[in-house]
Image (tube, grey):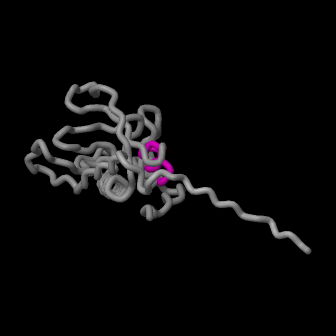
Amino acid sequence: MKLLPAILLLYDSAPFPPKNVPEPKPLPQFEYCVSGKQRTADTTCVVDGDTVWLKGEKIRLRDFDTPETYTAFCKEDERQQRYEKALGRQAALELLYLLNYKRWTIEYFGMDRSGKRRLATIRIDGKDVGDMLIEKRLARRWPKGDEFWCDYPVPGRPPLPKFKPST
């Protein structure tokens, strides 16, 4: 007679779902900030790839920098300025997607040098969103990173990789 191994299933007597465990709080939904629109105590929007308004507070995400979306930093020529603004919009839209469709946490670090924006880091699955944008060539390390978007287009330099949104 051949014996088959027995499978023993143990069930915990704890109820499912567990009692007294709060549901995760819903995250605020961000929109794209509209230039010139009045900000209120409930404003939650993405200004650009490194600045957001969260419940009426302006927040500068630290340790990275993205191209400008409204006022171009690159002053070389009009093509570079258009490219910077377009890349800045892509960075803002990627951040908007990440904040609205991924679970994230925020850690605060005081105020920036101007005293007008609170410094913070937003993480998704423990990873800084700045690092995510840098990997996609939508941002640079700050303050030491190269503003690569001001170097485009340069004759003889290969074009920058095409942006692929997160899914």
- Left or right of residue 48: residue 156: right
**Residue placed at 82% from the left, 70% from the top?**
4
Instruction: Quarter of the image for the C terminus: give it.
Output: bottom left
Residue 135's spot in the image, x, y percent?
50, 50
Question: Among all residues in the image, which is located at the extreme bottom?
Answer: 1
Residue 21's spot in the image, x, y percent?
37, 46
User: What stretch of residues is rendered in magenta?
Assistant: 127-136
Residue 59 position by quadrant: top left
In magenta stretch: residue 129 = yes
**Residue placed at 26% from the left, 32% from the top?**
118
The number of callouts visible is 0
- Left or right of residue 31: residue 10: right
Q: Is residue 66 above or below residue 154?
A: above
- Left or right of residue 120: residue 135: right
Residue 72's spot in the image, x, y percent?
27, 47
In magenta stretch: residue 72 = no
Q: Please state which of residues 152 and 42 is positioned toward the viewer in this rendering.
A: 42
Q: Please state which of residues 3 and 71 is positioned toward the viewer in this rendering.
A: 3
Instruction: Quarter of the image for the N terminus: give it.
Output: bottom right
- Magenta stretch: dominant secondary structure: helix
Question: Among all residues in the image, which is located at the extreme right?
Answer: 1
**Residue placed at 23% from the left, 33% from the top?**
117
**Residue placed at 45% from the left, 42% from the top?**
128
Residue 88's spot in the image, x, y percent?
33, 52
- Left or right of residue 3: residue 135: left
